[in-house]
Image: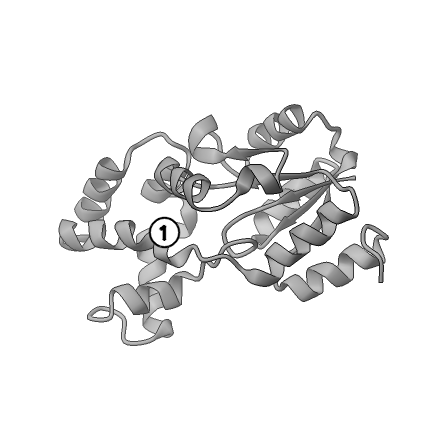
């Protein structure tokens, strides 16, 4: 079984409500207000941000479109986009899980919806090539989850059939899409619960 990791909220911290409350404190006094802003900014990763995720538009164009759509000052939007790398901190429990899986001889890959600038940042800041044999960033292949195309492309990239892949992702829609194509899946919430599932499936020792 080959193990496939999503990145945001699985291996790297990604929690838009608290992120926006931190970097846009003048607009979001708490996570509740941050969550409301996140809906408008990220549009559930469709619209402007979805196109950015897929590498169909660059960062300046994304900022232009969000400004035109929301009326928020463009410089504030750019400031949020520039702050995203500070949010993408390593989740230590997930990093430990990677080391444990590798020690058991499993082959690891990644499949992440990630705009190119942030993909570049992660490659430069973390030892992805040590952790993973290969991976797919949406921004580089012009496709994104949950489309079938990116899952098919991942199978080709990973040299695997769907039934040979175990996928950890935090987004229910992505998990449903992968499962429908025959992948084994885990809806990620915490590293601890992920490990329990891996043990149940006899992919890790108890």
Return the x and y of residue 2 as percentages of the image width and height: 74, 38
Q: Is residue 35 visible?
A: no
Residue 122 vs 89, above or below: the answer is above
Horizontal placement of 118 versus 194: left or right?
left
> Which quadrant of the figure has residue 96?
bottom right
Q: Residue at x 37, y 73 (%)?
A: 32
Colouring rule applied to residues: one colour
Residue 158 vs 95, above or below: the answer is above
Helix, strand or loop at mark 1: helix
Return the x and y of residue 6 as percentages of the image width and height: 57, 46
Horizontal placement of 43 versus 14: left or right?
left
Quarter of the picture containing the N terminus is: top right
Q: Residue at x 48, y 59 (%)?
A: 13
- Pick whichever, 146 or 105, lies toward us: 105
Using a 10 Å C-alpha cutoff, classify the residue at mark 1 as few (fewer than 14 neighbours), some (14 to 19) or many (20 or more): some
- Pick whichever, 192 or 131, lies toward us: 131
Return the x and y of residue 48 as percentages of the image width and height: 32, 41
| Disc 1 target residue | 85
Horizontal placement of 166 versus 113: left or right?
right
Q: Residue at x 38, y 68 (%)?
A: 18
- Pick whichever, 85 or 26, lies toward us: 85
Horizontal placement of 73 versus 84: left or right?
left
Return the x and y of residue 175 as percentages of the image width and height: 64, 48
- Pick whichever, 41 or 199, lies toward us: 199
Quarter of the picture containing the C terminus is: bottom right
Q: Is residue 93 visible?
A: yes
């Amino acid at each position: 079984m080959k193990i496939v990791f999503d990145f945001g909220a699985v291996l790297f911290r990604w929690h838009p409500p608290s992120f926006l409350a931190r970097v846009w404190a003048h607009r979001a006094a708490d996570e509740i207000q941050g969550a409301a802003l996140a809906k408008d900014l990220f549009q559930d990763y469709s619209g402007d941000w979805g196109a950015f995720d897929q590498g169909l538009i660059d960062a300046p164009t994304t900022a232009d479109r969000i400004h035109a759509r929301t009326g928020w000052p463009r410089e504030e939007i750019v400031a949020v986009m520039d702050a995203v790398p500070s949010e993408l901190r390593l989740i230590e429990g997930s990093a430990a899980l990677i080391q444990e899986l590798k020690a058991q001889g499993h082959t690891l890959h990644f499949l992440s919806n990630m705009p190119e600038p942030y993909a570049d940042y992660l490659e430069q800041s973390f030892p992805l090539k040590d952790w993973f044999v290969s991976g797919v960033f949406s921004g580089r292949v012009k496709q994104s989850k949950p489309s079938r195309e990116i899952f098919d492309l991942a199978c080709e990239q990973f040299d695997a059939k769907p039934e040979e892949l175990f996928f950890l992702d935090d987004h229910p829609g992505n998990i449903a899409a992968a499962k429908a194509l025959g992948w084994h899946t885990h809806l990620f919430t915490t590293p601890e619960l992920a490990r329990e599932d891996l043990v149940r499936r006899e992919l890790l020792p108890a």
